[in-house]
Image (cartoon, rainbow, N blue to C red):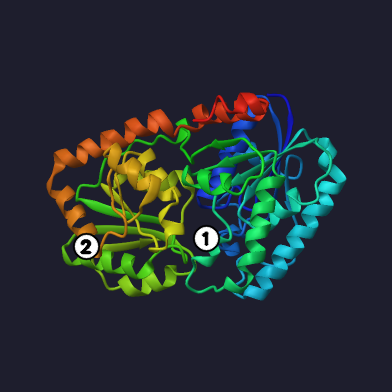
Amino acid sequence: MTKKLLMISQNFYPELGSAANRMKMMFKAFKLKGSDPTMLTTEPTYPNQNLFDDDTYFTDHSLNELEKSKIIRMKMHGNKQNSNFVMRLVYYMEQYIRLKVFLKMHKEDYDIVYVSSPNIFLAWATLFFKQAKRPTYVLEIRDLWPDSVNGLKHINISLFMPLLKYLEKKMYNSADKIVINNEAFRAHIQNRLENKTPIFYLPNGISKSELVVEEKCEDFSVIYTGNIGYAQDVDKLISICKALNDKQIYVTAIVYGVQAAKFRQAVKDCAYIQIRKPMDRIDCLTEIAKHHVSLSILESSDVFMNVMPGKIIDSIGVGTPPISNISGPTEAIIQKYDLGFARKQASITTIVNEIETLKNDKQSLLNKENNAKKYRDEHLIWEDNIEKLITFLRKGDEDDKNIQN
């Protein structure tokens, strides 16, 4: 693939989380396969800006050398992590304007413009009002918006939903091709398309270089990693961890996000719960690999129940069975391939009992570990899946239909 590619994403290396890692892995894979990618993003601020005051997380030297040449960071005045809703809106509007200006000056330099959403303002700035057929505009959907925002308990956007739904539909229909990271999104998007826009499923994954192998902790241990935001049910997570603590089951929590402080405060006196600071991806994967099972606990809203959490992908990727209250395609995959445990809106008691059962049934636990590794090797290796994405980007509309899944 020799085409010049502009990638647009709010999240990118060295930020933490599955969104930044997805963009990092795609960028590196495109370059490795002979493409000429440029990443347009912002200064790293996720999970918080202070984390990047020094070079601790800038550990990829091959990417560091591309800063300011192939990795272009828009200088923003505001902070995207601002807790004030109005100030965050101002930030996104500034981002929208800066991106529009960049595209007006440079879009003819690229054969493909690949924009990842959320945030939604980047997709709007990229897709709305486009006129020329060149470059090809590819929209990646990692979250259904505005449904995902409307599902948050602390935000009420019901008054604006008709307008937002119109803009959502316009966004899908403005794209030449669409990439999704969750099969549950396909029908939702197709129902809003006026033409047969090609859609390709590219799950989050794990690189061959990240296939860490670690000895398990001597004592049976549970791990929770990553964000505790508004999509996660922090109260249920706290209750589960406290119940495990009462049963003298060790829990490690490597957490960040707007509700992480609430979690830390609630479990600070629990002798069997260890809180650790955020760490880079390889270190985090290493810790997950050492533990026996992992937790992923989401809010009960359908829009969150139908996602594919990055923490579950990471857990499967290192052979640690995930335990979750999730439903939809992720629940179906975990159950079908016996990768761990997933049940829609599973109760605290059900989840704790399942963990305790696996603690006492070493053969069942080992089977799930081996099943997770097998599923990973067949479905979640970046180097394999990126080849399919490149084929999708190369092909015309008729050919695209023949390579779905």
Which mark, residue 244?
2
Residue 185 in the image: state x and y as whole percent: 51, 47
Which mark, residue 21?
none
Q: Is residue 358 shown above or below 159?
A: above
Q: Earlier in the sequence, mark 1 or mark 2?
A: 1
Residue located 32% across and 67% down the image: 236
Residue 282: image quadrant is top left
Secondary structure category for the residue under label 2: helix
Q: Image check: 105 left or right of 115?
A: right
Residue 17 in the image: state x and y as whole percent: 50, 52
Q: Is residue 80 shown above or below 331?
A: below
Residue located 79% across and 59% down the image: 97
Crowding at label 1, few (<14), some or many (≥20) Cα neighbours within 10 Å?
some
Which amino acid is tagged 1?
A: Ser
Is residue 118 in view?
Answer: yes
Residue at far right of view? 105
Secondary structure category for the residue under label 1: helix
Which amino acid is tagged 2?
A: Leu
Residue 96 in the image: state x and y as whole percent: 75, 58
Gap between marks 1 and 2 measured at Cα: 30 Å
Q: How many numbered marks appear?
A: 2
Crowding at label 2, few (<14), some or many (≥20) Cα neighbours within 10 Å?
many
Q: Which residue matches tag 1?
A: 148
* Front in this rendered view, residue 118 or 186: 186
Is residue 226 in view?
Answer: no
The reply to whether the C-beta atoms of the residues labelled 1 and 2 are less than 8 Å apart is no
Which quadrant of the rendered structure holds the N terminus?
top right
Residue located 38% across and 46% down the image: 330
